Every structure is written in C-alpha cells, then in structure tokens.
Amino acid sequence: MTAPARLLILGAGGQLGAELARRFAAESSGCPTPWSLTALSRAELNLADADALRTAIRHHAPQILINAAAYTAVDRAESERDQAFAANAVAPGILAEEMAQLGGWLLHYSTDYVFDGSGFLPWRESDPTGPLNVYGASKLAGEQAIAATSARHLIFRTSWVYAATGRNFLHTMLRLGRERDRLSIVADQIGAPTTAKALAAATVNLTLRLRDGFAPPSGLYHMSCAGETSWFGFAEAIFAAFSSHQPPPALTPIATTDYPTPARRPLNSRLDGSRLQRDLALRLPHWRDAFAEVAAALITTPAR
Ligand SMILES: NC(=O)c1ccc[n+]([C@@H]2O[C@H](COP(=O)([O-])OP(=O)(O)OC[C@H]3O[C@@H](n4cnc5c(N)ncnc54)[C@H](OP(=O)(O)O)[C@@H]3O)[C@@H](O)[C@H]2O)c1
C-alpha cells in the first residue's frame, strides 16, 4: 500500500489556514491514497521562533508544506516592523531552507501590496514591485527569501481575502451597518475580493496533483478571484446580499485621500491570473460568485 503523503499546514487559526485544514480533512476521507495531515496554529508554532520552526519541520518532514500563517495587520505593521518582518520575511526563508533539505514543495501566499498601485492594468508576476507600506515590504522580502533557496516553491499573490469567519471587510461592513445609518467607503482602490474558500479549493486541487507527480515551474503566481471592484462596490454587494437581514446604510463613495490610515495602500490592486491558468491550469471564480457562496453560508449559519 502507498505510504500516506505528509502534508503540513501552518496558520491553521487564520481565515485561509482554517479553510485549508477543513478542506484537506474532507479530502482525506475516502481518499485511496491517504494524507498524513498536520495543521498547526500560532499557539502551536510561532513563526518568529526560528529554532522551533526548524525543529517542527524536521519532525514532521512534510512532502508539501503550506504556509498560510502571516503577520496581516497592515496598519499595525507600520509601528511593528520587526514583528512583521520576523513572520513575513525571515520565517518564509527558513521554511524554504528546510524544504530544500527535505526535497519537498513549499506553497506560500503573498499579496497585491507588493505593488505600488500605479496604472490601471492588472499586474503580472514579472512587473516591478514597489510596496507602499511595511506589510507589503515584509511580504516582498519573504518572496525573495524563498526564491533565494533551492526549494521547489509556489508563491501565490492574492488580494482582499475574506471568509465567513475572521477579521475582514465583510464583517466590518456588517457591524458598521448595524451601528450607523451612513458609511463613507473608499471607491478608488480597485481589486478583487477573494474568498479563503476559493483560494483553498485551488490550493487543494493543485496539492493533489503535486502529490501525484505534477512538477510545475517554481515561482510567483497571481491568484485572486476574477473580475474587479472597489471597496465601495464590494460594500454595495454586501449590503444588497444582507438587505433582508439588516437595513442597508446609505453609502457614500470617497477617495483614499479622504480616509487616511497609518499604512498607505495601492490604488491598483488588479492581479493578472494568466500565468496561474497557463502553468497550473487553475482559475478562481468571479468575485461576485465566490461572495454569493459565502453570503449564503453566513445567512444560513451566522458567524459566531
Ligand atoms: N487578508 C488579506 O486581505 C490578504 C490579502 C492578500 C494576501 N494575504 C495573504 O494571504 C495569507 C493568508 O491570510 P489570511 O487572510 O488567512 O490571514 P489571517 O486570517 O490573518 O491569518 C493569518 C494567521 O497567521 C497567524 N500568525 C500571525 N503571526 C504569526 C506568527 N508569528 N506565528 C504563527 N502564526 C502567526 C495568525 O494568528 P493570530 O490570529 O493569532 O495573529 C493567523 O492565524 C497570508 O500570507 C496573507 O499575507 C492576505
């Protein structure tokens, strides 16, 4: 009988990590070639502890390591640079070094915030980066640390991630909508809201193929839902979907300059997914379809 494929997921307490752990567990039941799946949360493994990271990876010796853990507090990162870089820049390099030793795959996630947001065209993987904030700079440094090793790796840059649970724009909007009659929402940052579910589905699909010997080129891949909107457009979609459960507030579109935040954010967050489709045969759903699924699930079972 074939030995179980060893899979290790980091960041199991986060939006994406939790969805990945759920999906892989479901995939394992009834699977002819079983997984040996370990999913670790921050409490079980801290990315900032380099020794613990190396020990854990050597202990689990995964064939595929999926890192969904990251320092994601974009505004706080401006005043917590060291913590952001420890988790987002140093740790991914260590993970890659260890996976190079093991000869396995490292799957890692990065962000549209590596770009400066100029122009109107969707960013390609080969486009020059220019992060506007500490979080983006730390994630870019993480990409570079991985690429500097000989580990087989796939880095997925994604955008505007949310899930039915977790700290995200969807829940912030629903809460603010209950508290206020009017909301002003930024309308000049353009990107694609991307569900953890869509990211996890694509990742699981790919992982099954990697396990079976698929060997795509290592490198960067842009992985976000199809289509585009602004935060204002996303807010409109959210309040329309939940209108029978809570009265929608009046929404006013505003410019980024009218909503100052500690971290600057890119105006153009469009990501071109052509490489993902060409080299990995993966395509994420349109953001509206992915949102409809999450909204339907939330309406049926409201978030705790
Ligand atoms: N969220 C977005 O809008 C967005 C956009 C583009 C790219 N991404 C990328 O997508 C990936 C998944 O993001 P997500 O939305 O799932 O983020 P998330 O919900 O914030 O989850 C990240 C997880 O990492 C954990 N973590 C933070 N610091 C850690 C550390 N030092 N050691 C171990 N674990 C640590 C967090 O734990 P705590 O909750 O305890 O802090 C959390 O469970 C990340 O690589 C992120 O950079 C996210």
Image (spheres, rainbow, N blue to C red):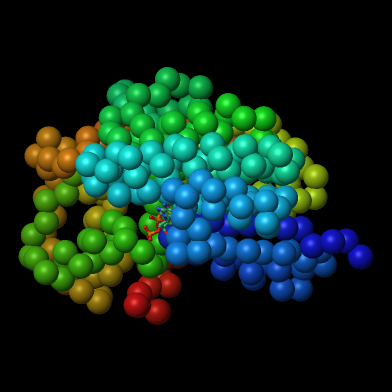
Give the percent coordinates (x, y) of residue 176: 16, 64
Figure quadrant of residue 25: bottom right
Point 12% across, 42% down: residue: 259
In the image: residue 114, left or right of residue 233: right
In percent of the image, x 30 and y 39: which residue is there?
A: 81
In which quadrant is the N terminus drawn? bottom right
What residue lies at 56% left-to-right and 33% top-to-bottom?
146
Question: Given the current orientation, which residue lies at the most extreme front position?
Answer: 51
Q: Give above or below for 104 relative to 140.
A: below
Q: Position of residue 231 (x, y in %)?
A: 26, 47
Q: Nearer the viewer, residue 3 or 268?
A: 3
Q: Is residue 164 visible?
A: yes
Q: Give residue 249's position: percent from left, percent from top.
A: 13, 63
| Front-most of residues 289 and 259 | 259
Residue 89's spot in the image, x, y percent? 44, 37
Q: Residue at x 58, y 57 (%)?
A: 9
Tell me where residue 267 sits by quadrant: top left
Compared to residue 293, the image places residue 137 above or below, namely above
Question: Which is nearer the eye, 211 or 250?
Answer: 211
Q: Is residue 203 visible?
A: no
Left or right placement of residue 83 versus residue 276 in this view: left
Side of 13 where 39 appears, left or right:
right
